Amino acid sequence: MNKSTMSNFERLTGASAALHGLLAVFALAASSHFANSDNAAMLLQRGGQIELFHALAVFAALCVNARLPAMLFTVGATLFALPLYLHALGGFTAFGFLAPIGGLTLLAGWAILLAILLLPQPSTA
């Protein structure tokens, strides 16, 4: 699929996945170079791993035309990783409640993707 045949949804969702990949690599590097404690390094690594895995999951979901899971992966990765990064880099914990919401959103994305791939699809005649 080339850029000219992609819908706006696919382009924006794909771009958000690329941003997640970029931020993930930064977070993983920051865990080694900028973290001021072992706990901060662990938080950056966990956020980076979640973002990187789900950036790839967004692209996989888009490849099988699973738009809802792609969107849930994007939102869930943001909600999960952002509070970890804020805590690790600035000690800011007020948004910690978002991480479990992000985790549940990611689980929903995986469950819906599983259903899309396993349940019979209506045939188009």
Image: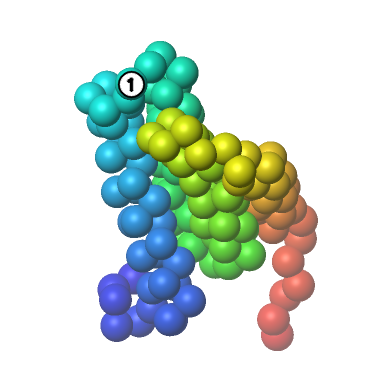
- Rendering coords of residue 32 (x, y %): 27, 22
Among all residues in the image, which is located at the extreme left? 33
Among all residues in the image, which is located at the extreme top? 38
Q: Looking at the image, which residue is at 35% across and 81% down?
A: 5
Is 23 placed left or right of 50 in the picture?
Answer: left
Q: Looking at the image, which residue is at 41% across and 62% down?
A: 16
| Foreground pick, 81 / 124 | 81
Name which residue type carries label 1. Asn
Q: Looking at the image, which residue is at 48% across and 76% down?
A: 9
The answer to whether residue 110 is seen in the rendering is: no
- Rendering coords of residue 41 (x, y %): 38, 22
Q: Looking at the image, which residue is at 34% across and 36% down?
A: 27
Is 15 placed left or right of 46 in the picture?
Answer: left
Above or below, 67 against 118 in this view is below
Secondary structure under badge 1? Answer: loop
- Rendering coords of residue 72 (x, y %): 61, 57
| Foreground pick, 108 / 100 | 100
Q: How is the image coloured?
A: rainbow
Q: Which residue is mark 1?
A: 36
